[in-house]
Image: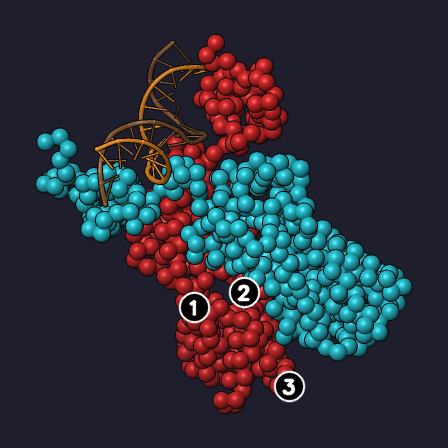
Chain colours: A cyan, B red, C orange, D brown
DNA sequence: TTGTACGCGTTATCAT
DNA sequence: ATGATAACGCGTACAA
């Protein structure tokens, strides 16, 4: 009897073989145990509707008994669908990105996709490497941060022929799809918020990443349209932090007369400025009104003196997920360019 | 001539074939173009030392020309090494986890590994699903949060036969390796810090996840050893947040006389308590001393009235990475149980 | 140093 | 509803 089962095998040879997973059972092992073909097992697991009720149950039992775990490397290779979505973000150390990534991961996970995460640390060259590395896993879709990418990245991505969502920014000419908001408009809104309150003496503290600089640009432009020039513009490193905000405010205080109002390109910078102002006995917002960006949760209660600009990070993540799932599901998304907008949160009348 | 090259092919048929990547070039395509075997190309890419200088250059040229991107699904299947490390964390929305994950990702990336991230949201059952999902990618190693896992998880993991690092906690009997610190000791340190300052009337606000509760346990034990019982113990949801901290402090204030000192199991809770105290005109630390945990960067400048307990999150991440790389590299780690310790950061003498 | 040949575990196609 | 068989793209003994 050449193809006999292992029943009756002496315990001394493979004692654990029938109890725990011996050594990574395969589809073929399950099939053998049940007495069906591998194809049937594969179908039972991925398209249960195509398999008869009773064989499906027997297969399930065998799967449990063997502790069978499907090999998605093999599955992906055969089907050309990895069920993997790659996301490349500058950092997960700020809620700006982490909340969106969490939401993205949740939504994708619910649909059977997993998240391959690349963290670029705000370095352009690192994005290049990460894109290359990540594409070698043959992800079914790709999420990128921002709309500026090196030619190499653009080339690789076009060659990959998968859906791509650029996030946290907006453009009329995305690589594929884009979901975010206009940083120029955010900067304008910050400026207008202060101008509308009657301020004319306004300084700017901006981090040096591309999107922060575009917020600064929008701000300066809006001021110009009101016949104003910024009191001063201070550029800090990226990412903006509380410490950098303190330093920048100190520089502001020591290099000339304080402005009447201050635009910071992010809440951490704004919080730092606020902190330094307090230390120096400068009243916020009475002496210096400060507006930030990002609506970081800490600031809501800790820094009620700050005004900020909020966008919905979770909406960003879920929208990106939805776009991807639509495309992968063969549905056409309602729109490939999604502006999730933002709103000014004035916590004080200042 | 049966195996002819595509030279001389009329442009009208495959015009782009010789310029851009036509449609996912494979190793075989590269080999054909160079006129060597696929094996040689494979070696040139993964073990350059085994290939002659000049053929390696020609291969590199062909790779560039075709825009060849290796398929790691196939590679992983063939070699049984995915170059993937999976990590499962409750959240990336707090620096507690995000910084460690960032460091982990950096270190692994530098060694040629990529990070497959699962976010469990503090749900035990979700960890089960994620482990199963993640193991189907055949990761070369696994990073888990904490030391308590369901039997199903333990079984699956043992069956996977890969290095595992449990993080953010400590035990003498890890699944495989562990890097973190003792939460009981953190709780004890918090209590002792206050007791040593002469406080005897101490309350506790704790989140309800396992590690936070163990910090509470350590705290209550240490108090008992000094003949003290906590004024009150308030349990909040997980994860602890500024809002929950405010609510808990309000409850404390309204349900009886305020304690003289307060232990919070995390900094967000402590910041919330501090905020609510301020709102109620309660001086911190003169009327109520507050100690938190986690050393969240925001608290350093914003809440100088708080004492906190710090552990090195980046050290945690890099140690985990090092353990994994050691094992995967065939080196034996110095120790499979790493206590990274912690320190009390007293920001005020209170 | 290079080539040959096989296998990795799964899905898809085409029968039955 | 189920089975046989051929890919999928690559790594790796083994041979040359």
- Is circle 3 on the same chain as circle 1? yes
Marks 3 and 1, Cα distance to the nearest angstrom? Answer: 31 Å
Q: Which residue is mark 3?
A: B281
Q: Secondary structure at mark 1?
A: loop
Task: Determine the residue positioned at 17% across, 43% down.
Answer: A15
**Label 3 environment density (alpha carbons within 10 Å; few <14, some 14–19, many ≥20):** few
State the mark number for residue B139.
none
Is any atom of residue B31 visible in this view?
yes
Chain for numbered disc 1:
B
Labels 3 and 1 touching (C-beta < 8 A): no
Coordinates of residue B210 in the picture (x, y in percent): 41, 67
**In the rendered image of this protein, does residue A6 appear above or below residue A143?**
above
Instruction: Decide: is B123 above or below D12.
Output: below
Q: Give a yes or no on whether discs 3 and 2 share a subunit.
A: yes
Figure check: A308 above or below B275: above
For the point 62% across and 86% down, which residue is it?
A: B280
Badge nearest the viewer, 2 or 1: 1
Earlier along the polypeptide chain: callout 3 or callout 1? 1
Q: Residues within 10 Å of mark 1 (few under 14, many from 20)?
A: some
According to the picture, the residue beneath numbered tag 2 turns out to be B294
């Amino acid at each position: 009897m050449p193809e006999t089962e292992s029943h009756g095998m002496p315990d001394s040879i493979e004692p654990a073989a029938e109890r725990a997973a011996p050594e990574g059972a395969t589809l073929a092992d399950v099939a053998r145990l049940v007495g069906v073909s591998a194809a049937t097992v594969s179908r039972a697991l991925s398209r249960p509707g195509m398999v008869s009720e009773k064989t499906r149950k027997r297969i399930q039992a065998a799967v449990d008994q063997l502790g069978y775990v499907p090999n998605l490397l093999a599955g992906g290779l055969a089907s050309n669908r990895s069920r993997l979505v790659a996301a490349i973000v500058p950092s997960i150390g700020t809620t700006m990105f982490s909340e969106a990534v969490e939401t993205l991961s949740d939504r994708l996970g619910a649909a059977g996709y997993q998240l391959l995460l690349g963290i670029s640390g705000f370095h352009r060259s690192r994005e290049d490497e990460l894109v290359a590395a990540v594409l070698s896993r043959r992800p079914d879709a790709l999420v990128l941060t921002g709309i500026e990418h090196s030619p190499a990245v653009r080339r690789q991505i076009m060659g990959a022929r998968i859906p791509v969502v650029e996030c946290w920014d907006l453009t009329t000419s995305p690589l594929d799809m884009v979901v975010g908001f206009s940083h120029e408009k955010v900067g304008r809104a910050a400026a207008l918020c202060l101008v509308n309150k009657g301020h004319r003496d306004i300084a700017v503290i901006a981090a040096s990443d591309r999107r922060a600089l575009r917020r600064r640009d929008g701000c300066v432009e809006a001021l110009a349209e009101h016949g104003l020039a910024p009191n001063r513009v201070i550029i800090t490193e990226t990412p903006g932090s509380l410490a950098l905000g303190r330093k920048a405010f100190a520089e502001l205080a020591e290099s000339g007369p304080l402005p009447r109002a201050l635009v910071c390109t992010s809440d951490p910078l704004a919080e730092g400025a606020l902190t330094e102002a307090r230390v120096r006995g400068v009243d916020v917002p009475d002496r210096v009104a400060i507006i930030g960006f990002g609506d970081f949760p800490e600031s809501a209660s800790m820094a009620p003196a700050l005004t900020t600009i909020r966008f919905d990070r979770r909406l960003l993540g879920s929208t990106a997920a939805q776009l991807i799932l639509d495309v992968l599901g063969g549905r056409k998304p309602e729109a490939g360019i999604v502006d999730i907008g933002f709103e000014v949160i004035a916590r004080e009348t200042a």
